[in-house]
Image: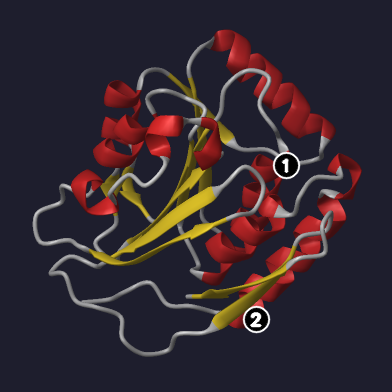
Amino acid sequence: MMKLAWSPERASKAYIDTVQSCKVFGESGVAELISAMAAGWNAQLIVETWSQGGVIATSVGLAVARRHTGGRHVCVVPDERARSEYAERMSEAGVTAEIVVGEPEEVMEGLVGVEFLVADGRRKEYWRVLRLAKLSSKGAVLLCKNANANPASKGFLWRSLVAQGSRRVVRSVFLPVGKGLDMAHVSASGGNTISSGRRWIKHVDQRSGDVHFIRT
């Protein structure tokens, strides 16, 4: 069974490119970190959720990652107003993404083989997006950004969200970057653990100067 394979070179390139693309936003560096992870895992189907008025830097980072992987980057938005704002702001940043409008139950049904998923903890249905995702047989990386923004998201159990038969959570971690980033690596079909080839990613918060090391 094929599994997601980590490429530190691709991750580094995406990180650097996102730093350049997101300088104008002056944010905490979450976008660079997420971009490096999506590119490093060579995700062929990257999915995110976004709502009106939301931060756009992460989306730009995912668009950069998609360029390095040659895959798809799909953004799920709740309504036409959000779609219009998202498209306009992405265009201003010089990047694009596929945009799908609708509720999680209908949208996630048509997105099969998700390998990298970023849900927004500010949206009350974030857990439905994570649970309904049709993950790739090679495994997937799931992230909840703005995890601190929703009290209900603190400490939630990833295992209770991964209702995928033989799948299981290989590992999970919470990072105190931005407004909280909760992530989990889900196994390939069959539940095999990725026990070798682990590497460390160094992430520096551009505002505070804090250094974080992430084991992949």
Image location (x, y in percent) of residue 10 = 63, 74
Question: Against 82, is 18 above or below?
Answer: below
Residue located 45% across and 58% down the image: 44
Question: Against 181, is 140 above or below?
Answer: below
The mark found on residue 9 in the picture is: 2
The answer to which of marks 2 and 1 sits earlier in the sequence is 2
The mark found on residue 30 in the picture is: none
Which residue is at the front of the view, 122 or 119? 122
Image location (x, y in percent) of residue 28 = 76, 50
Task: Farthest residue to the right: give it.
Answer: 24
Colour mapping: secondary structure
The mark found on residue 57 in the picture is: 1
Asked which secondary structure carries label 1, the reply is helix
Image location (x, y in percent) of residue 205 = 76, 60
Residue located 54% across and 60% down the image: 38
Image location (x, y in percent) of residue 101 = 46, 19
Question: Against 148, is 65 above or below?
Answer: below
Kind of residue indicated by mark 2: Glu
Kind of residue indicated by mark 1: Ala
